[in-house]
Amino acid sequence: MIVDCHTHINFTGDEVSLAEHPAATEADTVDVCIVLAAAGKSSQETNKALSEYVSKYEEKTIGFAVVEPTKDNISTKNLSVLAEKMGLAGTVLLFGEWLSPCSQQSDAVL
């Protein structure tokens, strides 16, 4: 089994189709892909869209929720909801651009 363990999807449009997610359409080279969503208006909206997407294409995708610890509830209970109720396999923590090693703001922090 071939797994693409790092694909991204953006939910800025009205609907995302499998054709717009190239890793998931390459059936002859990739059996399943892990899908990470780009942070949108809110983590809650993004994770809902991701949950709907991976449930629609569950044979080809595994979703990981996006969580911003500086903005979102990161309690064990809330993270469990992402897995149990939304059907997402795990979480990806995003700390915003200010902590990116490539940003000028991070120079003061690092």
Image: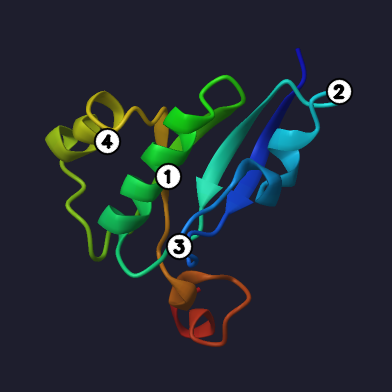
Residue 86 lies, with reference to residue 101, above or below; the image says above
Q: Which residue is mark 1?
A: 50
- Quote the CA–CA distance across marks 2 and 3: 29 Å
Task: Indicate the secondary structure of the residue bearing disc 1.
Answer: helix
The label shown at residue 99 is none
Q: Which residue is located at x 34 percent, y 70 percent?
A: 41
Residues under numbered marks 1 and 2 in contact, where contact means CB atoms less than 8 Å apart: no
SS at badge 4: helix
Mark 1 belongs to which amino acid? Leu
Q: Which residue is mark 2?
A: 28
The quadrant in which the N terminus is found is: top right
> Which callout, 2 or 3, points at the residue further toward the start of the chain?
3
Residue 27 occupies quadrant: top right
Residue under circle 4?
82
In front: label 3 or label 4: 3
Residue found at the very far top of the displayed protein? 1
Whether residue 101 sits left or right of residue 44 in the image: it is: right
Q: Residue at x 31, y 47 (%)?
A: 48
Task: State whether residue 26 is above or below residue 20.
Answer: above
Which residue is most to the right?
28
Circle number at residue 14: 3
